[in-house]
Amino acid sequence: MSESTCGTVAIIGAGTMGQGIAQHCAQLGYEVQLVDNVTARAEAAKFGIAQILERLIQKGKITNDERQSTIARIHVQATVAAAAKNASVAIEAVPEVVDLKVELLKVVVASAPAECLLATNTSSLSVTEIGARVGHAARVVGLHFFNPVPLMDLIEIVRGVDTSDETVSRALSFSRTLKKSAIVVRDVAGFATSRLGVMLGCEAIRMVEQGVASAADIDRGMELGYRHPMGPLKLTDLVGLDVRLAILEHLHRELGEQFRPPPLLRTMVRAGKLGKKSGEGFYIWKDGQPVAKAR
Ligand code: NAD
């Protein structure tokens, strides 16, 4: 994979992150093979990308030709094997469940060319464990994208114990082709970003539980007082409360008591209040925008 040559990226899982990674890779010229176990979700993700690109045309940021060529580069596949067939990079973006990620990357290994980079978008799980269980640890690397992918500049590259130098160097090269800035971190639960970001969100949820202030005021405190572009509760809504809970459960097991998930988070997930994607979390979401709840 040379830095000037675009290849094929297989993306497994077409939820929040899979959709964003697919859009960004296709906009940068990669052929994208998108697969989800619910094929309708992959189709919906492609439709969602088309709508986002339409808005970018209206804002004068891209041309109609760019929109059409981007959409034409996104191919929905029915199976992981079909998606991986010609991939130079495969990225799994399925839920934060280690067994699921391992199972799917094993299918990629069986179907993709031998030089295909095997990447996981996990926010917290062990890249070392995923690599060892997939059986090709040297080729497995964490490519941790941020939400929304087309707008966020960072890719956190996570190096497992047996990830090879060549794999890290290819991951860096791939990040450059996506015009992202990369940091390379050691494989410790939560890496550099989730560990700090999730802790802030977790403490903010505890503060809502204790009635310290409303979610909107806690967020405004961090936005205006600390210049955070987005408060920790709005960000939790954007990420998905279910996703945050899964990360916290893992960090609690690995790093200890300070990451114990707050009961309020568990209750909200059980009630289906997952944040932006379900229309309600710490905010009510209308037309993609957060509206503060009455206290
Ligand atoms: P999501 O729930 O929005 O999407 C997951 C998708 O995977 C769903 O569409 C689901 O149908 C699909 N899926 C489930 N089982 C599958 C299978 N067997 N084969 C193919 N597809 C399958 O989750 P998400 O927020 O996109 O998170 C995905 C991963 O990215 C997680 O590991 C998460 O920790 C990580 N991540 C999330 C964020 C975020 O802000 N949401 C940021 C960085 C990393």
Image (cartoon, helix red, strand yellow):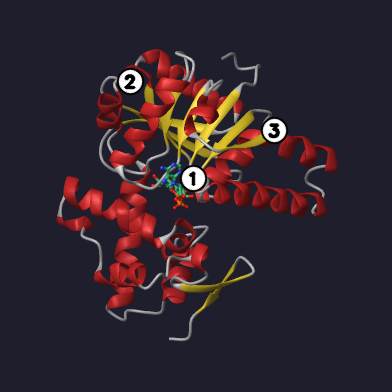
Tell me where residue 149 sits by quadrant.
top right
- Residue located beneath label 1 in the image: 146
Q: Is residue 286 left or right of residue 99?
A: right
Q: Is residue 231 visible?
A: no
Q: Quadrant of the C terminus?
A: bottom left
* In front of the other: 52 or 218: 52
Q: Is mark 1 within 8 Å of ligand 1?
A: yes
In the picture, the disc for residue 163 is: 2
**From what the image shows, is residue 98 above or below residue 238?**
above
In the picture, the disc for residue 85 is: none
Q: Is residue 87 left or right of residue 23?
A: left
Q: Nearer the viewer, mark 3 or mark 2?
A: 3
Tell me where residue 176 sits by quadrant.
top right
Q: CA distance from mark 3 to mark 2?
A: 30 Å
Residue type, numbered disc 1: Phe
**From what the image shows, is residue 18 above or below residue 158?**
below
- Residue located beneath label 3 in the image: 73
Badge 1 local density, few (<14 within 10 Å), some, or many (20+)?
Answer: many
Badge 3 local density, few (<14 within 10 Å), some, or many (20+)?
Answer: some
Residue type, numbered disc 3: Arg
* In front of the other: 250 or 42: 42
Rendering coords of residue 92 (x, y %): 44, 36
Per the image, label 2 sits on a secondary structure element best described as: loop
Q: Residue at x 33, y 50 (%)?
A: 196
Which residue in the rendered view is the most extreme toward the bottom? 295
Rendering coords of residue 44 (x, y %): 62, 52
Rendering coords of residue 227 (x, y %): 49, 59
Q: Is residue 64 visible?
A: yes
